[in-house]
Image (cartoon, rainbow, N blue to C red):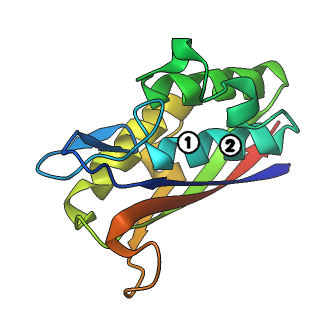
Amino acid sequence: MRIGIGYDIHRVNAHRGTLKLGGVSIPRARGLRGHSDADVLLHAVADALLGAIGAPDLGELFPPGDPKYKHADSRWFVEQAYARVRRAGWRVANLDTTVVADAPALSPYKAKMRQAISRLLHIAPSGVSVKAKTTEGLPPGKRGIAAHAVVLLTR
C-alpha cells in the first residue's frame, strides 16, 4: 500500500469567471485565479496521486508558467497522474478530500464531485469522499479556496 497527500489553494478571481471544483462547474460563484482552470480540488487529488508513487509534484510536471497549460482542464492533470499510478502498478483503493471554502455552499455539489472524481480514477463513488468545511472567518476566508486530499493505493 502507498499513501499520498495533496494540497492546493487559489485566490478568488476579482472577475466573475467560472468556479470549478472536483470537475464540476458551480454556477453563480466567482471563479478562482490560476494558470489552468484553477480547480483546487483536482489539483490536490493529482498531487496526492503523484506523491503516493514518489513522482514529481503537479507544478514540476506541468509548470504554471508554461503556455500550453493556460486554461487547461484540471481533469487532464488527474488523468495524467492516474496514468502514472497505473504504469507504476498501483490502483486507487480510496480517496478522502476536504474543500475549505467560506463561499459558496458546497453541499448541493458534493455528490456530483464524488461522481466526477470516481470516473477519473475508475473507482466506485463510495471510494471517494468529498467534505466541505468553512474557515470560521480565518484566512483565506472569502478570498480563497483550499483543498486537501489523501489517497490510498494498492497493488
Residue 43's disc number: 1
Residue under the point 84% across and 33% down: 55
The amino acid beneath tag 2 is Asp
Q: Quadrant of the C terminus?
A: top right
Identify whether 89 is placed above or below 103: above
Residue under the point 80% across and 44% down: 52
| Marker count (numbered) | 2
Q: Secondary structure at mark 2?
A: helix
Q: Is residue 103 left or right of residue 88?
A: left
The amino acid beneath tag 1 is His
What x and y, as percent, mark residue 41? 48, 49
What x and y, as percent, mark residue 13? 31, 49
Residue 47's disc number: 2
- Residue, far front: 14
Residue under the point 48% across and 48% down: 40
What x and y, as percent, mark residue 76? 51, 22
What x and y, as percent, mark residue 141? 38, 75
Q: Are marks 2 and 1 in contact (CB under 8 Å)?
A: yes
Residue 122 showing in the rendered view: no
Q: Is residue 145 left or right of residue 24?
A: right
Q: Residues within 10 Å of mark 2 (few under 14, many from 20)?
A: many
